Image (cartoon, coloured by chain):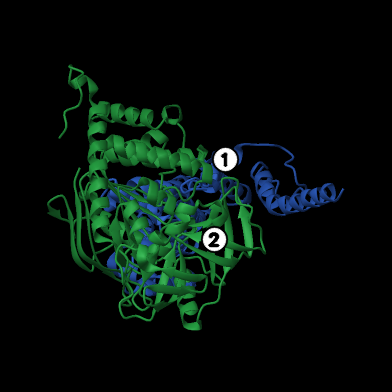
Chain colours: A green, B blue
Amino acid sequence: MAAITMQNIVKQYGDGFPAVNDVSLDVQDGEFMILVGPSGCGKSTLLRMIVGLEDITSGEMRIGEKVVNQVAPRRRNLSMVFQNYALYPHLTVYENIAFPLRLAKKPGEEVDRRVRETADLLELTEHLERKPANLSGGQRQRVAMGRAIVRQADAFLFDEPLSNLDAKLRGQMRTEISRLQRRLGVTTVYVTHDQTEAMTLGDRVAVLRKGELQQVGSPRELYEQPVNLFVAGFIGSPSMNFLPAQVEGSRLLTPLGAFDTGALPSAGVAGDRTVVLVGIRPEDFEDASLVSAEKRAQGAVVRVRVDVTEWLGNEQYAYVPYEAPRDLAEQLRELSRELDSDQMRTQAVVALDAASLITAGDEVELWVNTAKMHVFDPATGENLTRDEERVAALGRQSDKARQAQRRAQRADAEPPAEPPAGPPTPG
Amino acid sequence: MESARSKWLWIVASALILVWSLFPILWIVMLSFKQPGEVGNKPGFLPDDWTWENYRTVFETDLFTSALVNSIGISLIATFVGVVFATLVAYAIARLEFPGKKLILSFALAIAMFPVVSLVGPLFNLWRDVGLYDTWPGLIIPYISFALPLAIWTLSAFFREIPWEMEQAAQVDGATTWQAFRKVIVPLAAPGVFTAAILTFFFCWNDFVFGISLTSSDRARPVPAALAFFTGESQFEQPATAICAAAVVVTIPVVVIVLLFQRRIVAGLTSGAVKG
């Protein structure tokens, strides 16, 4: 097991296009790191540079203490699960899993023991003699995982391993991967474009955009304290609503209504800007008629016309179209295209309680939790309301959670080692 | 109704093609069982008097047996060397970027299109000067060079079909480039390698032009050339029946090889390599 350290990594292709641009990232020993971003953001290229299948144009890549820029993939002692699994079709499941051990010239009985252990772990024992062609998608995926974990690699690398599975299986395998990683405690880098995977699996998540690292942090930090418009729009589904706003003293005049910035941690966030973008997550809206008077006073109430509603049983989405100044509308359109969504019109998505009786076409009152509102600089996209104290607190919290969880897993892994069944000693 | 009708059409068409291609072979087989004196005297498709005489004659003639040994040896060696070369070249062409790649491919194509006969004269002179005339290598070398292009084209098409990830996975699993090639790529390309080998073997086995012009004795003369020197049992008789018997004998290996390996050739080994 080892930490992976990237320093100012650049990948430039022949035509000078930087697929990965000046990325510095620390993956700690035993950490589950997610690389996420829209298609073409360089996340897979970065992963392939870690494993050595892609040359590094400049920068330094370290695995453990060793600089590996010039080291061949086979000497890096990493294992990887490919998007299409890349199983060897001419070999049985057994031989597929045994392949890395055979190359390492391990003795026969050790190969056999470890392959059977791995197969047991992944519930592949009954399929060991079959060929990959005769397996289902989920089984193939497990064989690929088996091949990765059978040898004691320093780190696991996953390149969108679940993208070929159907939704239900994907959910199961996601839990399975998480359980496996916690159990083995091996440093893991996982590339995905699926935010559910990113949010649920990762100890930390790195968001990339056009080859540049935007933000690295715990899923909670990315969600609550995004550094800029891009991260704010990318993390969360449905994504954050961005409303253009005129600044008038401590009030922000948006197409939906006026919001007071008083509730925000940093007052006077707008500085001397006259126009800002206000970001509000769908769930920070609520049907005003369902909000208690006390809570109502803490936010703002706006009157809007609802265009379309979608009732999903556990919650309900309402779409509220609004007019935006031309240049800002263009900018928002650009952003949504970059986030792979290409939203046609400027509209706010609002998540309401399922009990709400709002229907399409109604003129309704919505309550907005202005304390959770974000304010962005429209020119740079920078988040002006990011609370560094809160970020630090979140960081400490996730570190603590991770340590606690590692302790639990260590205790789990070797229970018979300590005969007295006393409470686990802290530290 | 429609499908039953088209089925019948298919059957009739297949039967026609079968007759068209098998009739000459059957004719040769029938001729090979006739008495040497029967040809030209008694008309009829079936032999009047079935006999193994011609086969006995063929195998008792030194001319034929030595030619058979030459043919088998030369074809096998040329096939082996040619396929090993072609596999390496095709792999490089399919996988690596290097200057002159286009040039190699177009040269290979040009050689494949080159009229063989035009090279016979120069080769004859050259081989006599360097002492390769009437030797095994003297035939093996031109066979390899003319069989290579086809083998390279076939194999590089097969290699291109194999997903890159296979090899990358092998490298990550700890294989050197050579190990990845030998343990993953070659087994996956096995149907392609077999196809190339069989095509090369047939090319060498069936060749007549080089066989007759670059040899002068039993030392290296292959069967197709030897057949032309056949005289039969006595010089007063037409050797047609004996030649037919020899022709049947040299056709058998070809048929056996095709029957043995047709499943290998057709087998889609790569199915299931990726998600599917």
Residue name at image x 32 percent, y 28 percent = A117
The outermost residue toward the left is A65
The outermost residue toward the top is A419
Along the viewing direction, whichever of A255 and A319 lies nearer the viewer: A255
Q: Chain of mark 2?
A: A
Mark 2 surroundings: few (<14), some (14-19) or many (≥20) residues within 10 A: many
Q: Is residue B262 visible?
A: yes
Mark 1 surroundings: few (<14), some (14-19) or many (≥20) residues within 10 A: many
Q: Position of residue B37 (x, y in %)?
A: 68, 46
- Which residue has dot 2 on it? A366
Circle 1: element type: helix
Tell me whether circle 2 and circle 1 mark residues in contact (CB < 8 Å). no
Tally of numbered tags: 2
Q: Quadrant of the N terminus of chain A?
A: top left
Q: Is residue B181 visible?
A: no
Q: Chain of mark 1?
A: B
Q: CA distance from mark 2 to mark 1?
A: 101 Å
Circle 2: element type: strand
The outermost residue toward the right is B1
Residue name at image x 47 percent, y 71 percent = A258
- Which residue has dot 1 on it? B55
Tell me: A4 left or right of B27: left
Along the viewing direction, whichever of A294 and A353 lies nearer the viewer: A294
Residue name at image x 59 percent, y 42 percent = B54
Residue name at image x 52 percent, y 42 percent = A168
